[in-house]
Image: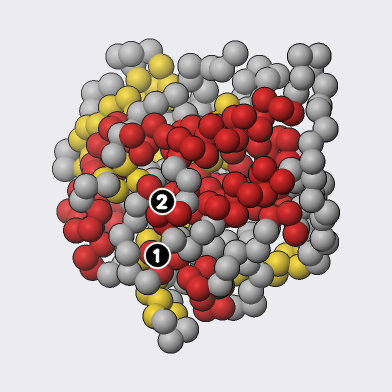
Amino acid sequence: MRPDTCPAPAVPAPAPVGAGVPGGPRAVGSVVAGRYRLTRALGQGGMGELFVAVDERAGRTVVLKFVRADRGDDDNRAALVAEGRLLRRAQGPHVVAVHDLGGDGDDGFVALEHLRGRDLEATLAERTCLSWRDGVRLLAQIARALVGVHDAGVVHGDLKPANVFLCDAAGAQPFVKLIDFGIASAVDDDAAAAADGAIRGTVGYIAPERLVGAAASPASDLYALGVLAWAVCAGREPFVARTTTELLFSHAFQPAPRLGSAATVPAALDDLVHALLDKDPAARPTAAAAAVALERLARTIVGVDGRNKPAPRRPAVRVERAFAPLSVVDPWSFAVERTARRGQGAATAVVPLARCA
């Protein structure tokens, strides 16, 4: 049985938080908007900071997201409000719920569902990759989440393991929730959002059309789903590169390799992932088509007796090492003459790759 809600993992050693906001400090024990008592700092990212809080009016635990105190200009506060509105628009069973949008003094906040579990990035860091059977079950849920998001006219824009949360589900398969809509956009206004030429996302997951100036679209999320399938089933991304420029160029212009060349997977999964990584966004499956295909494949894995059914496989080839970009880059620009300009620095590393069957 899938949970209706699922409360957020304990986070070790929270990062320092901002000194305060207009109208009062952001400190454990303080009350925001007359109802949210802050109980624990979860930490902070590039632009935002998170607290666990008790909603004393509704009697539930939530996560409050603020703009960092040192980044609290009008543009960043407006971006937080826009994120909350898009997230509310995209609500569905596989999307983290937004309970409230509000303000405390001049500073806005988003009150989010409090989830219990861990993100997919943490799972892959521990296990390197999953079996294709477990991978298909998760990918089917992610694709189904994208169906709802895209039907709502929203593009997530930053699909990657860190933004896929695996909720505890009482011994059953984890229940997927998409999180972090910080660079999400509306399908009908993304062209205007892209007018500044910035390419926002995570290196290694940005669709090729984005790297040559096109706006984000639902098809861009589907490309990221294809990369995610590689990370889940093969323990790495599809392109091996030694520099960020080489990696960006590969995504922009080189045909994607077959997943079946790096992991033992059914031919149907190999074909689907290859289609998701097509350079032409119009040639990629929609989220609905991908969800149906993955759900069909998931149903063939377990028979009525609960045992795994065999599936046709392609031979696996061991890949010894892979380039792994580790952080969000915003902005990135990329030109056909194979040059890249670094915006905020991206950490990179060469990591060992275990073979996954």
* Residue drawn at point x = 57 percent, y = 35 percent: 293
Task: Please state the horizontal and vertical placement of residue 323, each as a whole percent of the image.
Answer: 66, 68
Nearest to the observer: residue 69 or residue 160: 160
Report whether 51 appears left or right of 177.
left
Task: Please state the horizontal and vertical placement of residue 342, each as a whole percent of the image.
Answer: 43, 77
Q: Quadrant of residue 334?
A: bottom left
Image position of 31 with respect to 266: above or below: above
Dot 2 alpha-carbon crowd within 10 angstroms: few under 14, some 14 to 19, many 20 or more: many
Nearest to the observer: residue 120 or residue 301: 301
Q: Quadrant of residue 149?
A: top left
* Residue drawn at point x = 25 percent, y = 54 percent: 190
The quadrant of the picture occupied by the N terminus is top right
Discs 1, 2 touching: Cβ within 8 Å: yes
Picture disc at residue 209 = 1
Dot 1 alpha-carbon crowd within 10 angstroms: few under 14, some 14 to 19, many 20 or more: some
Task: Please state the horizontal and vertical placement of residue 266, each as a whole percent of the image.
Answer: 74, 43
Report whether 131 appears left or right of 179.
right
* Residue 45 in view in this figure: no
User: Which residue is label 2 attached to?
Assistant: 219
Report whether 210 appears left or right of 136.
left
Gap between marks 1 and 2, in whole Å?
10 Å
Say what amino acid the circle numbered 2 marks. Ala
Say what amino acid the circle numbered 1 marks. Glu
* Residue 99 in view in this figure: yes
